[in-house]
Amino acid sequence: MEYNSVRPSNILQNREHQKELRMRIETWDPLYYGMKKLKMRGKDLSQLTGAVFSLLELEVLDLSPEREACLDFKLMEVPPAIGKLINLRILMLDTNELEDIPKEIALLQSLERLALSNNHLMSLPQEFCRLKNLKSLHLANNDFVHFPLPVCELKQIEFLDLSDNSLVVLPDQIGDLKNLHTLLLFINKIIKLPDSLCKLVEMRCLWLGKNQLRELPRKFGQLYRLDWVTRYTSTNLDGNPLIHPPIEVCRLGPAAIDRYFSGLEGRSTRNKERNQENTDRENLDQSISNHKVHENESEND
């Protein structure tokens, strides 16, 4: 279907549809009070026309089916014309059949929140990194095997949900997301966390449950704003084959994790010192032995 052009014979029909859609724009949604919002439902959702993308005043566009009766009508694709809605701040595309996102989404420079959960996405366009005002990104329950690297260039992002995917590793660049306060990664296949994760000291919520983690980074205790003692849930770290630290320690929070690793480092230091003492003693004994042999040889001569 072509969204960017309208045949001359359909111009009048398109204008009428545009008027109808404008009548449906609301500004009283308590979640987005005062913002111009349009919610597409049912057949309108599966048969988007160019009229939708001519409503440049839109600030909130909801293209997510939400009721059982609406689940028969889903988006198979996001038209490139989405890039015309330059005043959009909120875009909801949850629970559709999307396999990719057009690069034109990068034209939405005012976008602050983007919901793409419950689709079939495996990647994001490179141009995605241009969404410099995006603060909240929802990508749960998709088909990501590799972490979408364009996200690591969104320095202003605060909330990121990549739970229920198939991620195995996280990139070192995730440490660049200094403003991130919520990171949801539960139900993946993550085997190791990068040390750079420990730079995200503003993080208050981190869910890592049901992965394949056997150990945490040594500086994990730097994430001191995480509150796992008073608000611990099974999505934090349960469901991992953790050894260092054991899950019992993890449940006590970042401070306990820090003490655990400090104890390991202390034992490691003591072992190194003990090994060095043994080595020095062996060297000294060998030196004495060699000296005695030399003295005996001199006496025989």
Image (cartoon, grey):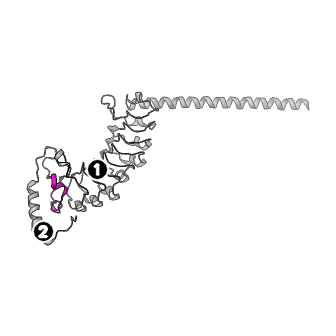
Q: Quadrant of the C terminus?
A: top right
**Position in image of residue 55 (x %, y %):** 15, 60
Is 208 displayed left or right of 41 in the figure?
A: right
Q: Nearer the viewer, residue 30 or 175?
A: 30
The residue beneath circle 1 is 119
Mark 2 closeness class: few <14, some 14–19, many ≥20 residues within 10 Å: few
Q: Label 2 is placed on what type of residue?
A: Asn
Question: In this picture, is 174 found above or below 287?
Answer: below
Is 294 displayed left or right of 230 in the figure?
A: right
What distance separates the C-alpha of mark 2 from that of mark 1? 32 Å
**Position in image of residue 172 (x %, y %):** 43, 47
Mark with earlier residue (2, 1): 2
| Residue extending furthest toward the right | 301
* CB contact under 8 Å: marks 2 and 1: no
Residue 67 seen anywhere in this rendered image of the structure? no
Residue 246 seen anywhere in this rendered image of the structure? yes
Q: Quadrant of residue 227?
A: top left
Q: Quadrant of the N terminus?
A: bottom left
Q: Which residue is found at the position 33% from the left and 57% from the top?
A: 125
**Position in image of residue 240 (x %, y %):** 41, 35
Q: Label 1 is placed on what type of residue?
A: Asn
Asked if the stretch drawn in magenta spans residue 53, the answer is yes
- Under circle 1, the secondary element is loop
Q: Which residues are magenta?
A: 42-57
Q: Which residue is found at the position 42% from the left and 48% from the top?
A: 171
Q: Nearer the viewer, residue 228 or 133?
A: 228
Q: Which residue is found at the position 21% from the left and 62% from the top?
A: 84
Instruction: Name the disc covering residue 10, or none.
Output: 2
